[in-house]
Image (tube, rainbow, N blue to C red):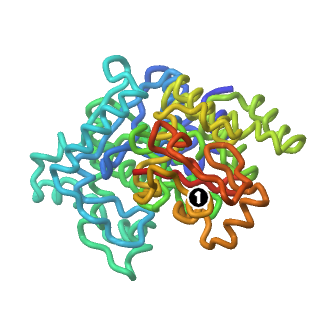
């Protein structure tokens, strides 16, 4: 199966400018393609991961990736998919973010070998506004620009001239990359379709060349919201911002209705292997084999095999009640200090279990606390406590500072003592 057919079978071809040209271009070993990343944050997140993985598919098929970070476009802000104006970042912040993203992208692409890294600030930093308006703006009509979804959807609520002009700036990227690297293909999510087609038009009008592009559907969560950092549900690729454990948990908690799609999108498993995992959902959904395979593949790809195995071990121990087998660093992967409930009044003489579960905010009332304790619904560090007079002492603290209180199957509180 050729790469284009594989992408189609995985649901990764949504909009395409010229299908025959794209298919022919993708069969040309050594041909280059480009994809872009917005340096609006210190790290990429799972919304960007599909761009990376799709680019890696093309690279494995023999094409050369050109990876662009928008040092210039990041100063303006892409209106695509946004109903309000973006908050402008400072030049220093965008520059710093660009350097961080270059390093992060270097974990996936070898910029010392075949892959090429570019920052569009290089060709915009000395480009005067007058020349931009003459060279680029003259080639587009207002009606063309208004027709693009990113602009059309914002006209009533208001859109600044800066964001209105954004597609022209990104179109210039395609022109410059085509001129310098003879690149004829841009890829991206469907929210980028207006920017991609603007680039195709600009190259055609400037150089009389036909270039092409395709997109894949936007990835949304179970509620239909776009998965992305600005939507308040970010899962970062930087292990310091989202631990490998939480990254693993994000994927292993994928619903049955979404997991097959995500296996096709986010893993390099064959379609036959994915079909077998799909069958496992129907036969034994409680085993969550498809979710575990997804979490393994994506965590290993994004971090490494060691991080995956450790995340899996932490998960097994946490939900298997073997909390005392976790290391201090494991605990800190699960629970951050900011999420911990701090107990300042834990005395050297210890603390009654009823008072502790109230103080740890796992239960609101003493009556409910007593009832849950007597019904074996409360665990401290993986051990059930059924005596309402039980005294939590210093010896019960993990690493001299921590307690993990659990109510029911999955309601955990991380307690920091002292």
Residue 303 on image: x %, y %: 48, 30
Number of callouts in the render?
Answer: 1
Residues 247 and 104: in front is 247
Outermost residue, front side: 349
Residue placed most toward the observer, 133 or 63: 63
Q: Residue at x 45, y 49 (%)?
A: 348
Residue 15, position as x, y percentages in the image? 56, 51
Please report the residue visible at 46 percent of the width from the left and 62 percent of the height from the top.
231
| The N terminus: image quadrant | top right
Q: Quadrant of residue 82?
A: bottom left
| Residue beneath disc 1 | 352
Q: Is residue 1 left or right of residue 403?
A: right
Q: Position of residue 202 (x, y in %)?
A: 32, 50
Side of 357 relative to 200 (left or right): right
Query: Residue drawn 40% across and 27% down?
Result: 107
Please, what secondary structure does the residue beneath circle 1 have? strand
Position of residue 388 in the picture relative to residue 126 (left or right): right
Residue extending farthest to the bottom is 156
Q: Residue furthest right?
A: 283
Q: Considering only vertical position in the picture, is 5 above or below 11?
A: above
Taking depth in this image into account, of 383 and 159 the one nearest to the observer is 383
Task: Look at 44% across and 73% down and name the residue there.
Answer: 153
Decide if residue 9 is in sight here: no
Quadrant of res 154: bottom left
Query: 364 above or below 333?
Result: below
**Viewer-side residue, 288 vs 178:** 288
Q: In this rendering, would 61 be left or right of 410? A: left
Note whether residue 279 is visible.
Answer: yes
Badge 1 crowding class, 10 Å Cα cut-off, few under 14, some 14 to 19, many 20 or more, is: some
Image coords of residue 395 (percent x, y): 53, 40
């Amino acid at each position: 199966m050729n790469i284009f057919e594989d992408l189609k079978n995985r649901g990764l071809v949504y909009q395409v400018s010229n299908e025959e040209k794209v298919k022919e271009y993708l069969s040309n070993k050594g041909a280059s393609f480009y994809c872009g990343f917005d340096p609006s944050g210190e790290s990429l997140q799972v919304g960007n991961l599909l761009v990376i993985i799709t680019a890696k598919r093309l690279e494995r098929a023999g094409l050369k990736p050109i990876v662009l970070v928008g040092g210039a476009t990041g100063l303006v802000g892409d209106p695509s998919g946004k109903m309000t104006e973006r908050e402008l970042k400072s030049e220093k912040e965008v520059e710093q973010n660009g350097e961080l993203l270059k390093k992060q992208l270097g974990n996936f692409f070898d910029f010392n070998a075949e892959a090429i890294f570019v920052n569009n600030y290089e060709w915009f930093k000395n480009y005067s506004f007058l020349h931009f308006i003459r060279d680029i703006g003259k080639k587009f009509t207002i009606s063309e620009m208004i027709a693009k979804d990113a602009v059309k959807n914002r006209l009533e609520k208001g859109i600044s001239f800066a964001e209105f002009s954004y597609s022209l700036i990104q179109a210039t990227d395609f022109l410059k990359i085509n001129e310098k690297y003879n690149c004829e293909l841009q890829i991206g999510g469907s929210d980028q379709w207006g920017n991609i087609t603007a680039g195709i038009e600009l190259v055609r009008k400037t150089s009389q060349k036909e270039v092409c592009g395709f997109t894949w559907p936007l990835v949304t969560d179970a509620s239909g919201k776009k998965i992305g950092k600005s939507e308040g549900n970010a899962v970062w690729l930087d292990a310091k911002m989202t631990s490998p454990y939480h990254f693993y948990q994000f994927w292993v908690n994928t619903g049955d209705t979404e997991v097959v799609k995500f296996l096709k999108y986010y893993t390099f498993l064959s379609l036959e292997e994915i079909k077998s995992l799909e069958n496992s959902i129907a036969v034994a959904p409680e085993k969550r084999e498809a979710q575990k395979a997804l979490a393994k593949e994506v965590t290993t790809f994004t971090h490494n095999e060691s991080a995956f195995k450790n995340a899996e071990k932490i998960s097994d121990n946490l939900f298997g009640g073997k909390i005392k087998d976790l290391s201090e660093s494991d605990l800190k992967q699960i629970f951050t200090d900011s999420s911990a409930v701090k107990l300042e009044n834990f005395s050297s003489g210890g603390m009654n279990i009823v008072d502790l579960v109230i103080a740890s905010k796992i239960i609101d009332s003493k009556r409910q606390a007593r009832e849950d304790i007597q019904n074996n619904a409360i665990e401290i560090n993986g051990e059930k406590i059924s005596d309402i007079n039980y005294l939590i002492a210093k010896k019960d603290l993990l690493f001299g500072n921590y307690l993990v209180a659990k109510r029911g199957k999955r309601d955990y509180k991380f307690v920091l003592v002292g």
